[in-house]
Amino acid sequence: MSLWVKDLRFDYRSFSLRVRDLRIEEARLTAIVGPNGAGKTTLLKCLCALLPVAKDSLFLGRRDIALLSAEERARLIAYVPQEHGSAFNYAVQDFVLMGRAAYIPLLSTPAAADVEIALEALAYVGLRRYASRPYFELSSGERRLVLIARALAQKSDILVLDEPTTFLDPKHETELMDLVRRLAVEKKKTVLLTLHNLDMAVKHADAIVFMKNGGVVAAGAPDDILDEALLESVYEIKMSILRHEGRRFIVK
Amino acid sequence: MTRKQRVLGWLVILFPFVVFFISLSVGVVRIPLGDVFKALLSPVFPAMKEGLPENVLGIVLGVRLPRLLLAFLAGAGLSVSGASLQALSRNPLVNEYILGISSGAAFGASLSIVIFRQSFPPQVSAFLFAVVAVVIVLAISRKSDSPIVSLLLTGIIVSAFFSALLSLVEFFASPYALQGLFYWLMGNLGWPGWGALSISLPLMAAGTAGLILMRWRMNVLSMSDEEARALGVNLGREKLIVVILATLVTSAVTSVAGIIGWVGLIVPHLVRMMAGVDNRRVVPLSAALGAGYLILADDLARGLAASFEIPVGIFTSLIGIPFFILLLRKSKRIWL
Amino acid sequence: MRSFASLWMTLRRALVLAFISGAFFAATAPSVASSPAQAGPSPALTVKDDLGRTVAVPAAVKRIVSLQAEITRLVVALGAGGELAGIDYTMRRHDHLFKYIYPDEARLPVVSMAENNVNLETLVSLKPDIIFASPFEKQIVEAIQRKTKIPVVALASLGDTAKLADELKLVGRILARERRAEELAAYFSGGLGRVRDRLKDVPAGRKPRVYMSFWGSLTRTPIRYDPVAIAGGLNLAEKAVPDVLGSAGTTVNVERIIAWNPDVILVHGNYLPAERTVTVEGILGDSRFASLKAVKSRKVRYTFGFWNWWDMAEVLLETEYLAALFYPERFPAFDLGRRCDEIHKMFYGLDGGFAKLSAALGCDEWTHD
């Protein structure tokens, strides 16, 4: 399922987000990058209707997001936060099970099928063996994966991740990016994430969206849009694009 | 769940029922269990009355049965309310009175006992003002950006407000009315008769049942607002439902039995120490453990001394708190 | 040398400052009314109050403030009502007969709420010669005396009829009304004595077993109640709680009442009918009590009970009333209305006391079945 931002506005104190006519292709990995304060996280949250969105401004597939109920929306798009803090130390399996909330009626408890889906999601991210462990006993990288598993349990076509690679060491960073790439390629999910690390974006993403000051500066495949002038205008410092062993590297 | 855990779970569920029946034969007057059962069956099978001493029927059906039923449902209800509000506010240190219910109810009771008397019985007044307090809390906290923090804060403030009003009423009360109020505030499961219970017990049962049905949902509601919404939950509506049910139960208990503290805080904690934080287990087990706990506390309150009675609220504090501290120190599970 | 000099300078400055401050505070201290107790002739009387305090009382007492309802009534009974300068809130609001026994009461300012919770300024501005207070909280009583420089005497009968009579005599001495005090004390003790005498030979086994529901609660009962004891009744709650802490009452549970199976149940009747939470009808109709002797023989009645301590006249009346209830064959001629009128006339010079009391409490119905 693709995403179409027709005309999105969001104002908050001194900050304004304005994005028009942005298409996120389905079954692709799209990275949103830009300097701090560009509005990346705000855009992400609007895409998931975690911030109020006006009618006729954002479409998931053909559906206007503002007209969807909470459950309907959660079945179409899943959000992976950067972190989760909680007073309660749920078992990993129970944690992932919460992803089924959109499918379980208010007064019911999860069925065996729901538990199966949760365990499958855990297996996909490689943490099946941790099912009974308390969440906070895991390392921060593993916790990140559990959050992704929970989003997978939602069985949505679109997956949105907020800075999933922050604070991860290079090995785990790479593993996570491989995982989300597989989600786009194998599972045909539309994956959208914000990144600080431009190299990661360039290496893994099918499309990159450059944001600055609450707006989109450029969007498209790296081969099409990436050049040093663009980088300088977005980040306001001089950068060079180097090629090495067939890959691009950004150097400041 | 291991076999051992499953057995333990069933033991906890059975515990209040066993205690309930045994307590029916405990009291000032010795009544053997056989006579107790005969008395219980006599409304349906009048023949059972044969051979029973005269006061047994009055005691079993008129004194002990209503009291134990109240202890059962109140214990279950207060525990489940506490557990639910803890999940909702993501804070295990929250108790069932956090939204201003106890202060509102106390103020309502004071208005009735001191000023309005007959025309406005304390049960009705207490219930009404308990609900009013929660409505005020909800109305005020809705306006804020961060609903949960302000829910707790507003609860504290509204509680303080009603406490101040209560002090004002107390100040103008005659010493005789004051005495009545004082004893009401201490909590006593022995006051209400079948009349008052016929209204409040169904409310308690309905509210408790509703909260137990929502037990899995509470796991989801205990996530941050953002996460819960992302998971597809209609946050405002579902939180309101939980608050309404918890308020209904707690107000129903407080209006007929006064303020019985510490049940809703301690019981869910004990359950989490034993069974983990998953609310699918915490909520129903809290109901069972709470019911049994309050029955036992009440047995002590009415049976400890031959001739006089100590308010049950004192026992729930005196027993619950040290026990809780003991378990806290022994517990190695990381459940927080 | 220099440091010594500067030290001395500092010291001198400190002394001067202390002196000035002291003078300042002394000058601005609340000016106390010049009461005879402070600067006048040597006190005529030294009394010991119920808190064990020795209080010097002035010779001529012209102005009285009473924070204690029981004493207020005694003052009026002694004929010293005209010397009252201030009363407690309960007297104004909760005493059913005060406006009849002391018609002028409307002019009296309320000086305190709920016993010793006084407004010191009002108190001092009234310039009383003596203050009567309740014997709780010794510190509060002493604080009042210390701050107002007026002698405070703390007295209360605490449910003891002998003590009540002694209290009357003590107040009589303080107010120079000894003759009247003796007269009333004799009337009171004589009346109680007559009841006792007529019941001298009743064996303990024959005494009716009595349960009292007091203070508006079914389960609150007094551990000690003299009128019941003098009237030959057995207070079932008497042995209930060891009276170590001096608590007047205790809480029992309903089962205990049923187990006791009292012969007579008494309900606290001094509450206005509209304010009663426990009623005779309620008990008679309560299915839990259907098996009780008292309910079957319909011996469930109102009685006066404690009321802001006690009204001496009411205590005498109540004792006679209860004796007639417990032993109708020994007191066949008892007439509640007539005796009420007589006793109130004797104590307060009040005519038609029964009619007035009945208008408030409905006691004209108490002797009916």
Image (tube, coloured by chain):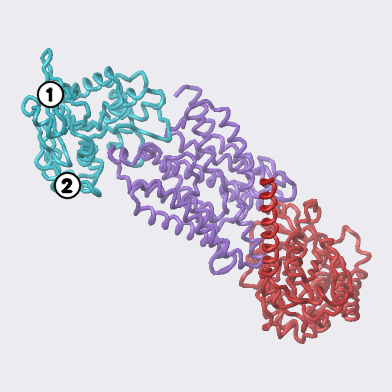
| Mark 1 burial class by Cα count in 10 Å: few <14, some 14-19, many 20+ | some
The quarter of the picture where residue C200 lies is: bottom right
Chain under numbered label 1 = A
Question: Residue A166, relative to residue B109: is it above or below?
Answer: above
Q: Is residue A252 visible?
A: yes
| Mark 2 burial class by Cα count in 10 Å: few <14, some 14-19, many 20+ | some
Left or right for C74, reference C359: right
Q: State the hue of chain A.
A: cyan
Q: Residue furthest bottom?
A: C351
Left or right for C342, reference B106: right
Q: Looking at the picture, how far across and down is residue C270, in whole percent?
A: 70, 71
Helix, strand or loop at label 1? It is strand
Left or right for B2, reference B15: left
Q: Nearer the viewer, residue A249 or B132?
A: A249
Q: Residue furthest top?
A: A245
The chain assigned the colour purple in the figure is: B
Chain under numbered label 2 = A
Question: Residue A63, relative to residue A187: is it above or below?
Answer: below
Given the image, on which type of amino acid does mark 2 rest? Arg
Reading the image, the residue beneath label 2 is: A9
Residue at coordinates 27% horizontally, 17% vertically from top-left? A171
Q: Looking at the picture, how far across and down is residue B32, in whole percent?
A: 69, 41
Reading the image, the residue beneath label 1 is: A240
Residue at coordinates 61% horizontally, 60% vertically from top-left? B181
Q: State the hue of chain C.
A: red
